[in-house]
Image: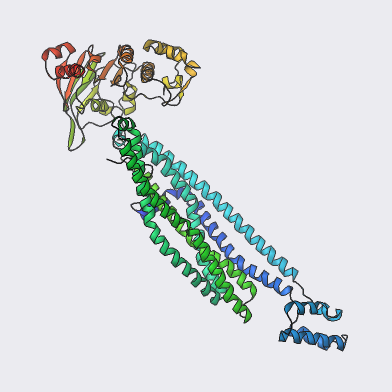
């Protein structure tokens, strides 16, 4: 059973040419290149300012630490002992306290209590003093540093958000213009959902990922490299300790990631299989019920669901433990830094403030690695999405017709059309129209019939210049369509197709689509002519009633509205392509009457499978394998008892059977 296109299928997560796609993306951002550079520079500077802060914080910590300790350097001790204003008893008590502290004869609390109880003359000299001027200076510097860093980060975020959204707007505008320049062949060979996905999902993916990934990548790389440099500048022993401790944790994380990746891949595959199965069963629900296939369908669903459950459970479990592992890496680094730092402090190699700085540097060293991985994943998504958008923009466009000067006025066109030895194929190996010639007089009603694949709709597409003919010519009032623009040709025709189309809007807007200066009286007159005026009056608001493609309006009513739209267009030529194939017999009669009124006075081409609807045609062209095998009126063709008679009688044979 073939699988359908689930929501996770059809859009590649990796690009075919990552470097080429990213290079073209940046070339497309050339308009905003200066702002982009400014944004990335600001992100880098903001990260650098963040790297400077820990060392200043270390200095602040050391200043405060020294300020809360008694002032007992050698010079001050000598000055106290030499001071004659201090009594010998006080000096002796001070000397005794110094010896006890040096020999650690008492605990720290008792020593500090004894210092607080020193005689006033000595305590005023040795009491703790925090250098508030230095503390204030460092605090102001740190505050300014963090403020400037935050300001730079805000500005770069604002710039990147603006650039990404303007770029997305530019892409959508380019796609919109491109759609109008693409030949019908492109839309015949590409699914509508695929085109819509490029316009919406892919453009949004480029904008959203670009907004975060570029600056995040620059910031993370700067923090990662900068933290290593700053750690070695501060103390090489502590730097090696922090890096080795982190590498142990990252090696563990790398092993887990290696094992989890296959489960993520399997999850996407199994999700696609399950969605495809659900889509098939849902779309063919009536068939499943009619053939009692519910049990088999449920068993298949359970089988696919269990596979997805296994992959989901394993991938989500392994993904869920990534954050705890990252916390472990950070905490393990903190512990290693604290242990080694304590030993170095005891040996007077570093100060306590250095440990504080390294606690921050460890976090700056470990966090960017995961952010870099996320940014690279986002870049992959950007490359894949932009590649699909650029592929669409690179599609071959319709030939440029700006040099064509000929023009037919629909008010003065007589209505004569001639096909002269027309040949056409969608590709070199597939010829649809082999050698088609016919001359249609003004006002004639021409019916085109034949089996599926005979070339009926292709003939109309050539007439409307949706496709270029390979050889031969098509003349309208003696003027070759090769010399007329597509817009001019489309202006000469009214088309009523098998698939009715109503856009979201009022009845009025739908009926006068793309036609200005149409009064309500003209609209109502056209509706009355085709017999849809009563239906419009039953709607709340009449012509102002809002309708859409998905509204609960019957197929026949939609078809009548499209016929009324054609009458308002009032062009000299008419094309009816299977206009009654989707309606019931009763509605067909109403639509047929409306079409008869629409064809009055116009040169009309009618493509029909129901041959009973074209009995009154002036000329019936019977097509087979790209050629006209018979032509004439309905009665004449029946008398010939040829291919047309076989087609006509087969309808009744099928009914009788």
Q: Is residue 356 above or below residue 161?
A: below
Do we see residue 215 in this rendering? yes
Q: Is residue 279 above or below residue 116?
A: above
Q: Depth check: give the residue in front, 346 or 177.
A: 346
Coordinates of residue 198 in the picture (x, y in percent): 39, 41
Q: Is residue 584 above or below residue 15?
A: above
Which part of the image, by quadrant, shows the C terminus?
Answer: top left
Coordinates of residue 369 in the picture (x, y in percent): 48, 62
| Residue that appears at 32% across and 19% down | 583
Coordinates of residue 615 in the picture (x, y in percent): 22, 12
Q: Depth check: give the residue in front, 14 or 633.
A: 14
Do we see residue 393 in this rendering? no
Q: Quadrant of residue 87?
A: bottom right
| Residue that appears at 52% across and 48% down | 161
In-image side of 72 versus 511 (left or right): right
Q: Quadrant of residue 91?
A: bottom right
Coordinates of residue 259 in the picture (x, y in percent): 38, 60
In-image side of 130 versus 635 (left or right): right
Q: Depth check: give the residue in front, 46 or 329.
A: 329
Q: Quadrant of residue 635?
A: top left
Q: Depth check: give the residue in front, 627 or 550.
A: 550
| Residue that appears at 55% across and 51% down | 157
Which part of the image, by quadrant, shows the N terminus?
Answer: top left
For the image, the number of numbered tags is: 0
Q: Is residue 281 above or below residue 58?
A: above
């Amino acid at each position: 059973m073939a699988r359908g296109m689930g929501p996770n299928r059809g859009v590649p997560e990796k690009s075919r040419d990552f470097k080429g796609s990213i290079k073209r993306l940046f070339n497309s951002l050339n308009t905003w290149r200066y702002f982009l550079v400014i944004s990335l520079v600001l992100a880098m500077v903001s990260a650098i300012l963040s790297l400077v802060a820990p060392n200043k914080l270390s200095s602040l910590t050391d200043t405060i630490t020294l300020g809360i300790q008694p002032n007992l350097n050698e010079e001050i001790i000598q000055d106290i002992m030499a001071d004659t204003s201090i009594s010998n008893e006080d000096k002796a008590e001070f000397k005794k306290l110094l010896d006890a502290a040096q020999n650690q004869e008492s605990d720290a609390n008792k020593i500090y209590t004894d210092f607080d109880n020193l005689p006033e003359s000595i305590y005023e000299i040795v009491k703790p003093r925090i250098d508030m001027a230095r503390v204030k200076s460092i605090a102001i510097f740190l505050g300014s540093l963090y403020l400037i860093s935050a300001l730079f980060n805000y500005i770069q975020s604002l710039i990147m958000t603006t650039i990404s959204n303007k770029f997305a707007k530019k892409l959508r505008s380019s796609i919109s213009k491109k759609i109008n320049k693409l030949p019908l062949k492109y839309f015949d060979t590409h699914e509508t959902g695929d085109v819509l996905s490029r316009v919406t999902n892919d453009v949004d993916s480029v904008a959203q990922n670009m907004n975060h990934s570029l600056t995040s990548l620059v910031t993370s790389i700067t923090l990662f490299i900068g933290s290593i440099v700053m750690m070695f500048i501060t103390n090489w022993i502590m730097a090696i300790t922090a890096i080795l401790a982190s590498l142990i944790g990252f090696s563990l994380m790398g092993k887990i990631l290696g094992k989890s990746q296959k489960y993520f891949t399997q999850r996407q595959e199994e999700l696609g299989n399950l969605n495809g199965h659900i889509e098939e069963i849902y779309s063919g629900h009536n068939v499943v019920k009619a053939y009692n296939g519910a049990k088999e369908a449920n068993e298949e669903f359970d089988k696919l669901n269990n596979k997805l459950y296994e992959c989901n459970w394993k991938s989500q479990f392994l993904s869920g433990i990534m954050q705890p592992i990252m916390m472990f890496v950070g905490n393990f680094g903190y512990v290693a830094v604290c242990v080694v730092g304590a030993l170095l402090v005891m040996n007077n190699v570093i100060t306590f403030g250095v440990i504080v700085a390294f606690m921050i540097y460890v976090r700056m060293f470990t966090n960017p690695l995961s952010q870099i991985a996320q940014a690279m994943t986002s870049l992959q998504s950007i490359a894949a999405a932009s590649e699909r958008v650029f592929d669409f923009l690179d599609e071959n466009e319709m030939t440029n017709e700006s040099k064509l000067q000929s023009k037919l006025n629909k008010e003065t066109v007589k209505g004569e059309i001639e096909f002269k030895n027309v040949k056409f194929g969608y590709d070199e190996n597939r010829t649809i129209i082999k050698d088609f010639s016919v001359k249609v007089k003004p006002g004639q009603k021409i019916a085109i019939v034949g089996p599926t694949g005979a070339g009926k709709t292709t003939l109309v597409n050539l007439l409307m210049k949706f496709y270029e003919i390979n050889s031969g010519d098509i003349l309208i009032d003696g003027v070759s369509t090769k010399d007329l623009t597509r817009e001019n040709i489309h202006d000469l025709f009214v088309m009523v197709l098998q698939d009715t189309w109503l856009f979201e809007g009022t009845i009025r807007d739908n009926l006068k689509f793309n036609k200005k200066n149409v009064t309500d009286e003209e609209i109502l007159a056209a509706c009355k002519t085709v017999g849809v005026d009563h239906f419009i009056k039953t709607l709340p608001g009449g012509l102002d009633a809002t309708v859409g493609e998905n509204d609960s309006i019957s197929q026949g009513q939609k078809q009548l509205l499209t016929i009324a739209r054609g009458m308002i267009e009032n062009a000299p030529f008419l094309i009816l392509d299977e206009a009654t194939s989707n309606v019931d017999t009763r509605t067909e009669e109403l639509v047929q009457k409306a079409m008869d009124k629409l064809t009055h006075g116009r040169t009309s081409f009618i493509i029909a499978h129901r041959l009973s609807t074209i009995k009154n045609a002036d000329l019936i062209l019977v097509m087979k394998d790209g050629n006209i095998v018979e032509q004439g009126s309905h009665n004449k063709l029946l008398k010939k008892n040829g291919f047309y008679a076989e087609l006509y009688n087969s309808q009744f044979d099928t009914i009788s059977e």
